[in-house]
Amino acid sequence: MAGVMRTKSKQPITVFSGLVWVLTRIGLPLLLLYGLLWWRADAAIEKQLDRMRAVVNVQRSGTILGLNGDVGIRNVRMTPVDGTPLGGLTVRAKRAVIQTPGLWWLVRASLFGVPKEIPSRIGFRLDDASIDGDPEVLNKAIIGGHVVFPFDLAGCDTPLSIEVLRALGSDNGNSSFQATLTHPSSKLLRWDISADSPGMVKVAGEMEMEIGADGEMARRFAAASFKGFQVVYTDLGFAANRNSYCQKRTGLDAETFAARHVEAASRSFAEHGVKPGAALTQAYAGFSRNGGTLTIAARPQAPVPLVGLAGVNLENASFLLHTTVRHNDLAPGAMTFLPIDGYVPTATPANFSGRDVPVSGTRDASISAPRVAIGTEIPYADLGAYVGDEVEVTTNMNSKRRGTLQGKSLMGVSLKAPAAEGGYSLSIPKYTIVNVVLVGSSVPATDPGSQNAQTK
């Protein structure tokens, strides 16, 4: 009888054997890769901390490596060494994290170096931070442990200090900070920044800019243009605590102190030669009395390079940006700053666009300089004496405008076009003006031989 050939039968795949296969063929390599990344991240962090220890001693309990690409340290304790500006202070945080585009980006950066292209996401986050130490040093460096409320103690006649902050309900701890740069498209960059101090205020801001699509990164950033900006202040209890504290300190009732605080806040702009317009004053008055949110948003009137915003003062900002302000969900108003020597409206007109130039609309009799002859340039500083006269304004945009001078301020001039051209009012920013020439005088001639009698 011939022998029977036996074949090895297949064993059925069980749940257990499938799980073992996944763990050994997929899970274990991934775990080893994660361990390698964690080890490299930990070594890189320790290397950077060693470089910092000449000025600040940093202690930590461990390294963070999230599956979303976040890398950082936990239970941080930073103590600047004696002799440095912040010596005597201790900063603690639950977590200090760098946000990256993801774990795969970290793998590439670890193996081949940091990619040259702009990452889709990069940022920094500090959680549950507090600052403590010598009260004298703290008072000189009120940073990190809280977010100062807008115009904090204006009108209260006491400086802001750690002692006062504690009296106002701040425990100088558990603050959080986050700054993130995202790159959602080839030309768009977005910054998001937030800071949160319990019992004080939360600040959240965002800014968008457009960069060049091609070329080196530095060149793309150099050509960036501003697209929009928004910042939101959310009161977390500071307004009520501040108002109560200052009312007791000044002996004023709630309404009187509220008015005093808003006036003191407005005076803080005097060093810039301006005062806030009606919309900002009204929105801040409601925010400082009742809390809630204060939202400020801006967008360019026309495409504006970021470098073009450098050095722009508060007066000229309205010529470049359309900026609005609002309290809670009320309708936003145009946020403007008016020159102290100009006309200050008592209310914001419903059709106010933020582009109008607030000017003095009366002839300035205090200017004693001799009047120029017709056809002669008028010094800008003397224009207030020529309100009502006909002038011609030459700008750096290769244009000439003729009309009746209606007013002049630190921001620009206002002209009324001739009736034959429509008689409309035109605002011309100061920074665009090349010269202003007198072409017709409204001052009666008193001396037949004087320059005022020159009429041709």
Image: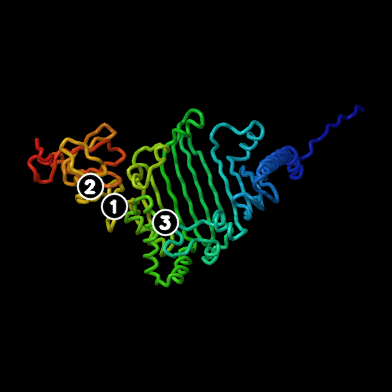
Q: Earlier in the sequence, mark 2 or mark 1?
A: 1
Q: Amino acid at mark 1?
A: Asp
- Give the residue type at disc 3: Leu
| Distance in Å between CA atoms under marks 2 and 3 | 37 Å
Q: Position of residue 102 (x, y in %)?
A: 60, 40
Q: Residue at x 22, y 48 (%)?
A: 367
Secondary structure beneath dot 2 equals: helix
Distance Cα–Cα, label 2 vs label 1:
11 Å
Q: Please tell me whether mark 3 sits on a helix, a strand or a loop.
A: strand
Mark 2 or mark 3, earlier in chain: 3
Q: Tell whether label 1 touches label 3 (CB within 8 Å).
A: no
Looking at the rendered image, the disc whose residue lies closer to the viewer, 3 or 1, is 1
Callout 2 touching callout 3 (CB < 8 Å): no
Residue toward you, 45 or 133: 133
Residue at the image position 24 percent from the left and 35 percent from the top? 394
| Relative horizontal placement of residue 312, taking residue 376 as reference (left or right) | right
Instruction: Mark yes or no: residue 26 visible.
Output: no
- Of pointers 3 and 1, the one earlier in the residue sequence: 3
Q: Nearer the viewer, residue 23 or 342?
A: 342
Q: Which-is-in-front pick, marks 2 and 3?
A: 2
The answer, for residue 39, to whether it is visible in the render is yes
Residue that badge 3 annotates: 294
Residue 341 tag number? 1
